[in-house]
Image (cartoon, helix red, strand yellow):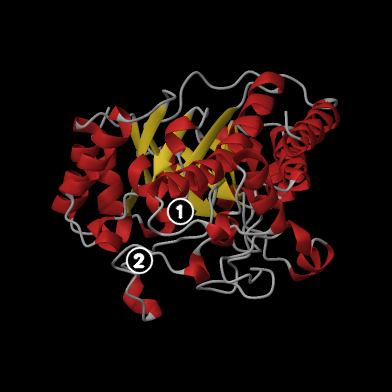
């Protein structure tokens, strides 16, 4: 085994030992809810009382939306978890994985961050938007940090699970509907958005294949495929390590927000979620981003289920603003379920109208 791989495994074993010492097994709910929402701590403001939080959550739970992926601080999870339980809401901690835009953190850990094919670190030059500061998945310390972070989340009483997001590389291709916002026509691989080419990744690939990925010509389809698969495996390895630790030591759910289908994810963001050993994936099937109609949601669900290598539940992610009209909202839910989805997760909670919630309540 190569030194590169040995060092990665060693650091993960250390992470497992240190993370799990204080993690105690907890019984998780029997199933994930059929209908869930993504939400953030900002929805609760800074002055909402516990009673008001309970009413906010019950608005969803009383209409059959009984699961929430909540992006918040650990302290807020500790506060809201018992309120969620009393309100009939299954609460999951939603936390970005491979992006970390904190300036002080970046200054102290710049070598953890990914480098594009133009040799620019995203710690210095973020692609697309300022918060796009991507970790390099080949850095062993990144894996250790993430394991410890998610183990800390899993220790919070009352959480049913953890929800991974941004568990990928930077977008090599934006959805076609978003490219005009950045004055881009991405009809080929652009070096500025192609990650990661840091010395760690280049040396790791060279140790395995005997060549520098920077030197692979465009016409070398086999070499390009090897480099693609090598990078895909770095992300799969991190996801599966986190999932195995959380499953083994807490029994809690591990879920992940992913791109529409395994094939699209591989091409667009170097993410092979077909191999993720999680309990459920939530492909973000935001049809307007891709200039597609509502039926495309069902087509993606069907393809995702058919091409999974590791079997898990699939909840179709629906952008509420894409289907505001009641007939479109109903159709989006129906095409997802009819094509095999285990449920639906709505983005975002605050966008759901009373009329839409009444529609969800009709499903059993």
Q: Give residue 335's position: percent from left, percent from top.
A: 19, 39
Q: Residues within 10 Å of mark 2 (few under 14, many from 20)?
A: few
Instruction: Please tell me whether mark 2 sits on a helix, a strand or a loop.
Output: loop
Task: Locate the N terminus and report the quarter of the image it occupies.
Answer: top right
Question: In terms of sequence position, does the residue under pointer 2 or pointer 1 come before the other?
Answer: 2
Residue at the image position 45 percent from the left and 59 percent from the top: 217
**Residue 348 seen in the figure:** no
The kind of secondary structure element at disc 1 is: helix
Q: CA distance from mark 2 to mark 1?
A: 14 Å
Q: Position of residue 86 (x, y in %)?
A: 57, 33
Q: How many marks?
A: 2
Determine whether 345 is above or below 172 in the image. Answer: above
Query: Looking at this view, is 271 or 249 the one in front?
Result: 271
Residue 4 image offset from top left, x and y in percent: 74, 39
- What residue do we see at 77% from left, 41% from top? 144
55 vs 134: above or below: above
Q: Is residue 110 above or below residue 313?
A: below
Q: Residue at x 27, y 60 (%)?
A: 290
Q: Is residue 299 something one can see in this rendering?
A: yes
Q: Is residue 198 left or right of residue 347?
A: right
46, above or below 362, in the image:
below
- Residue under label 2: 188
Query: Along the horizontal axis of the image, is 271 left or right of 97?
Result: left
Mark 1 lies on residue: 269
Q: Nearer the viewer, mark 2 or mark 1?
A: 2
């Amino acid at each position: 085994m190569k030194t590169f791989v040995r060092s990665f495994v060693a650091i993960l074993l250390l992470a497992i030992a240190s993370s799990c010492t204080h993690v105690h097994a907890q019984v998780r709910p029997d199933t994930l809810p059929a209908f869930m929402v993504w939400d953030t701590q900002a929805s609760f403001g800074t002055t909402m009382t516990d009673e008001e939080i309970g009413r906010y959550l019950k608005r969803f739970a009383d209409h059959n939306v009984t699961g929430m992926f909540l992006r918040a601080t650990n302290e807020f999870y500790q506060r809201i978890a018992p309120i969620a339980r009393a309100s009939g809401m299954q609460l999951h901690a939603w936390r970005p994985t491979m992006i970390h835009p904190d300036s002080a953190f970046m200054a102290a850990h710049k070598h953890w961050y990914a480098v594009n094919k133009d040799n620019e670190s995203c710690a210095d030059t973020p692609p697309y938007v300022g918060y796009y500061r991507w970790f390099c998945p080949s850095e062993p310390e990144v894996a250790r940090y993430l394991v410890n972070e998610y183990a800390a989340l899993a220790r919070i009483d009352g959480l049913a699970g953890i929800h991974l997001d941004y568990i990928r590389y930077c977008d090599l291709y934006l959805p076609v509907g978003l490219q005009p916002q950045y004055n881009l026509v991405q009809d080929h691989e652009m070096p500025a958005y192609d990650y990661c080419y840091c010395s760690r990744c280049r040396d790791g690939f060279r140790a395995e294949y005997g060549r520098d990925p920077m030197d692979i010509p465009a016409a070398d389809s086999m070499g390009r495929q090897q480099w693609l698969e090598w990078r895909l495996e770095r992300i799969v390895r991190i996801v599966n390590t986190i999932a195995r630790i959380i499953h083994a030591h807490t029994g809690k759910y591990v879920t992940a927000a992913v791109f529409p289908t395994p094939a699209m994810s591989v091409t667009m963001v170097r993410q092979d979620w077909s191999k993720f050993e999680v309990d459920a994936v939530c492909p973000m099937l935001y049809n307007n981003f891709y200039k597609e109609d509502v039926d495309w949601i069902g087509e993606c669900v069907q393809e995702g289920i058919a091409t999974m290598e590791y079997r898990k539940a699939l909840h179709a992610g629906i952008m509420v603003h894409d289907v505001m009209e009641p007939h479109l909202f109903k159709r989006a839910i129906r095409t997802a379920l009819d094509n095999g989805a285990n449920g639906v997760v709505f983005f975002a909670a605050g966008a759901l109208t009373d009329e839409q919630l009444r529609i969800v309540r009709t499903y059993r």
